[in-house]
Each structure stands twice: as structure tokens, then as C-alpha cells.
Image (cartoon, rainbow, N blue to C red):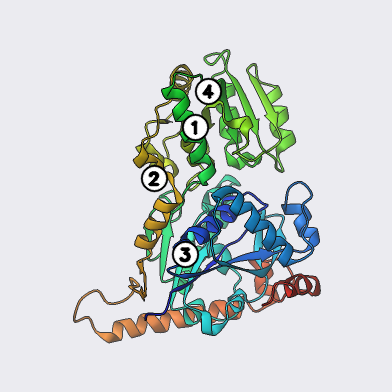
Amino acid sequence: MAKKQHIAIYTTASVPWLTGTAVNPLFRACYLAKDGERKVTLVIPWLSSKDQELVYPDNINFKSALEHEAYVRKWLEDRTRFISRFEIKFYPGKFSIDKRSILPVGDITEVIPDEDADIAVLEEPEHLTWYHHGKQWKEKFRMVIGIVHTNYLEYVRRERNAAGAFILKHLNSWVVSIYCHKVIRLSAATQDLPRSIICNVHGVNPKFLGIGKKKKEELEQGEPAFSKGAYYIGKMVWSKGYRELLKLLKKRQKDLAGLEVDLYGTGEDSNEVKEAAKKLELTVKVHPGRDHADPLFHDYKVFLNPSTTDVVCTTTAEALAMGKIVVCANHPSNEFFKQFSNCRTYNNSDEFVTVTRKALSEKPSSLTESQMHELSWEAATERFLKAAELYQGTIIIKPSNLPSKKFASLSSFSMARKWEDASAYLHNAAAGTELARRVFGAIPGTLHPDEELRRGLASSSR
């Protein structure tokens, strides 16, 4: 009997932070483990009490990793309505205020014992390996697959930091080539990376599909399914679409007279967004962030999302699943959504006005069964297994740096392997010195976890 695959999914965030790198890897672990054909472990960051206060909403603070794990499982089961048998492990992390993200502390490959190491999935591989110091991922695991979630270069460019963007571009390519056999980019909005393919391997929380089915029934029965107008939801920072949306509304407010828009979000730029909204002639109301599945959102008809920093926007997929019309930019990040009739794209402010007015005056099309499946995590899991070339009972490793011709000399492969080993050695050495780490933006003192992080993690040890 063939040994089961063991897939360890490492990610850079966890619920209750409702960011894409917390939610999507959690669902991926759940659905990969659902059929029982493989062993799955989700590896998520454990934060100090102080960092939890900075990251988690509603003053949620976990005293132990076991308490955090219980919260994660309940959050998931409330949405899937089934129990998936996968393991949850924690690695020590620290929140970087300037990067607005969680960075690993120490060698996080150690979370998985050597005897259990098989396949690693790195959700945000560049993020997880920028400052990696420890065992080489490819030596620890037989297969390492990166899934690129974030368009880091776009964020740096928006800060008008050309030198920073240049350095980051080459650093990302370098660490990904060292540590990953294969890379899946969710859309062409991401940086082109070695050994990468483009495939959207994300799905939608089943709750949203349930809402969409209910709305479909209401429409078919002639009931008023959508009584509200337009809205947007997202973390309230300028780079998450708020700047583009308010700019469009300000520029074309006379053409959009009478339009009312509700904005929902919480974030560092909330006060500035509120002030900018007040200056518009249009009625734009700003509200605190809420779960997108909240009944408050069910009756909105049009989701406005002009963001071009997303890779594949989770809230756009959720809005489509709920049967809404989505108005979004004609951008590579929205390519996957163009297959749905309720997705309306625009290229400029003139088209934004036309598309928005038309969307508000029309009735959304009902989703077909095949469209619902395409948005589901079942379909996303199928796409992932195919894109990653993972098959039940076997592991097929086809790194693109292997000689492609039948009689290619072994020496060329040997040279490539030696170059990769030398690169890994150089990166590991640099990441092992405090000075080099600080130069490249690491949080000081993150080579090893401190006493507070170790205490919190002790409760999760098996």
C-alpha cells in the first residue's frame, strides 16, 4: 500500500485576521484533507500578546496556541459545516508595522519533523524565505511548491521607490529559485518568477455560494432580491482600492449624480478615507469593517472594486458567488472573473460611469451550476492538484531546470545544481547575520524566538 502524501501548508497569517493569506490557505488545507486521501498540516504564525493586539480585530487575544487552534477550527467549521481532519501547527512570528505583515522568526522548517517532511506548500514563498536562516527547504522536503498571493512590486512602486522595487524584484526571484521546485502565480498581476505558471487555485467560502443560491431562488420567483445599491469592502488602506475609487467618484461625480456608495473597512487609513469621502458631492458613507458574509451585505446589488494591487481579489469572488454584479478594472488580476456574466470591466473613467450606471439599472444574471462549481473550493482544489502536478499516492517532480532534451549532458544539470547550492549557502549565511538582516528590512532580534513566543508555542507541542 502506497504511503499517503503529507502536504505541509505554510502561510503568513491566520484568522481572526481576515486577510487572504489567512483565509485561503485554511480552506486549502480543509479541502485537500476532506477526502482522506492525504495527510495535511497547516502551519500558521503564533504571535505575542502585543502583536495580537496590533493584528487581530475586536480585541481578540489568545493566551496559548491551543486556544488559537480551537478558534481557527470553529471559524472554519461554522463556514464549511463539516469537519476536515487536518493538523494545525504554529511557527513563531512577529508583526512588522512598516511592512504591515507577519514575518517568521527562526527556522520554521523545524515545525515539521524530518521523518514527516514530504511536500511543502509555501503560501507567499518570497515572504516566507526573505530572511530564512536554517535548513534548505528543498533538502528538507521532496517537493516545495510556492503560491504567490501578493503583488509586492506594485506596493513598492506606489511609494515611488524605484531602487527598492528593483532590489525586491531580484531578491524575490533569487529566493524563490533557491527554495521552490515549482511556483503557482494566482494571476498575471504578480511578478514573473522562475519555474512559475499562472493558475487561480483559490475558491470561495461555501457560505457565499449558499447566499448566491438563495438569491437565485428569489430572482426566479420574481421577488426583490437586491434592494440596496453599490458598496465596497476591504482593508481600509489607500493601496487597497480606496484611492482609485474615491478618485473616480470625485472626477465623475456630476455624471454619477444620485449615486450612493457604502464603504466598509478598518485599517490604518480609515480617518483619511472618511475625510476624503466627506469632501465629495456624492453620498459616500464610511463604515467599520465587517465579515462579508454578514446579512448586511446580502441585499446590495453592485460591488465596486477598482483595485489594481490585488492578485486575485477574494471579495470580488465572494460578491460574484452571492449573485451580485461586480464592476472592476480591466486588469490581469481580474482575468479569472471575466468568464462570469456579472463581471463588468472598464478601462477608463468614461467606461466606469457607463458600466456602473448600467449595473445599477439591470438585474444580475443567475449563476449556473457550472459557474458555482468554478468558484468553489472543490474546483480550486482540483486546479491546485493539477497545477502542482500532485497525484494521489505519488509525487511527480519536474523542476524546469532539469535538462529537457533526452540526451542533454548531466554536466549542465550538475552545474545548475552547484550554482543553486552556492546561492542557498550565500543566502543562508547572509540571513544568519543581524547586520545583513537589518539592512534588508528584517525585524531586529528575529533569528531566534524570544521567551514569550516559546512559552506560547509550548502548549501546541504534541
Mark 1 or mark 3: which comes first in sequence?
Answer: 3
- Position above or below: 332 against 180: above
Q: Nearer the viewer, mark 1 or mark 3?
A: 1
Crowding at mark 1 (Cα within 10 Å: few <14, some 14-19, many 20+): some
Which residue is denoted by mark 4 in the rendering?
Answer: 226
The amino acid beneath tag 1 is Lys
Instruction: Check disc 2 and give the amino acid type.
Output: His
The x, y position of residue 436, in whole percent, is 65, 73
Residue 146, numbered circle: 3
Which disc number belongs to residue 214? Answer: 1
For mark 3, give the secondary structure: strand
Rendered location of residue 71, percent (x, y): 69, 57
Q: Is residue 192 above or below residue 354?
A: below
Of residues 21 and 161, which is closer to you in this image?
21
Select label 4 or label 3 by which is in front: 4
Calculate the distance from the C-alpha at mark 2 to the C-alpha at mark 1: 16 Å
Residue at horizontal 63%, vertical 26%? 262
- Residue sitting nearer the eye, 334 or 57: 57
Q: Secondary structure at mark 1?
A: helix
- What is the CA distance from the residue labelled 4 to the residue labelled 3? 39 Å
Q: Quadrant of the C terminus?
A: bottom right
Q: Classify mark 3: residues with Cα within 10 Å, few (<14), some (14-19) or many (20+).
A: many
- Distance of mark 1 from mark 4, alpha carbons? 12 Å
